[in-house]
């Protein structure tokens, strides 16, 4: 199978578990589901996110924006839990 020309890139992101909450990562993945596919797993001290089928037609950096949302979601959740 050959990936389509507009959805052919991928990346792997490691987010430290001390900084990121898994539920916040899942929420960010759901927010960006129209722009890429996300698979989250735990590996030692990190949440590892495999980002595939990244839509290359989107303005901006989908992976960087996903990471920003995951961090912001974590901050919101932590503030709410205080």
Image: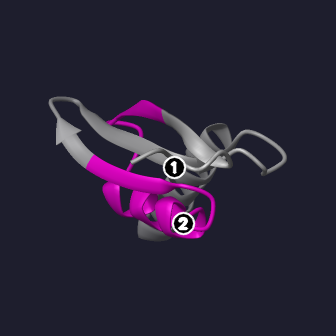
Does residue 2 sit above or below 80 in this rendering? above
Q: Mark 1: few, some, or many residues within 10 Å (few <14, many ≥20)?
A: some
Q: Quadrant of the C terminus?
A: bottom left
Decide whether residue 73 is among the magenta residues: no
- Secondary structure beneath dot 2 equals loop
Does residue 55 sit above or below 32 in this rendering? above
Q: Which residue is mark 1?
A: 53
- x, y (%) of residue 40? 30, 50
Residue span colored magenta = 11-40
Decide whether residue 30 is among the magenta residues: yes
Number of the front mark, 2 or 1:
1
In depth, the one of 7 and 48 nearer the eye is: 7
In the picture, measured across the screen, residue 25 lies left or right of residue 68, that is left
- x, y (%) of residue 67? 57, 43
Instruction: Return the mark for residue 33.
Output: 2
Instruction: Return the mark for residue 32.
Output: none
- x, y (%) of residue 54? 58, 47
State the residue lying farthest toward the right.
Answer: 59
């Amino acid at each position: 199978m050959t990936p389509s020309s507009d959805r052919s890139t991928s990346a792997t992101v490691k987010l430290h578990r001390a900084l990121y909450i898994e539920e916040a990562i899942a929420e960010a993945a759901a927010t960006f589901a129209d722009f890429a596919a996300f698979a989250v797993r735990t590996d030692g001290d990190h949440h590892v996110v495999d980002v595939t089928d990244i839509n290359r037609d989107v303005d901006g950096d989908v992976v960087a924006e996903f990471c920003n949302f995951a961090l912001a979601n974590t901050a919101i959740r932590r503030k709410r839990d205080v």
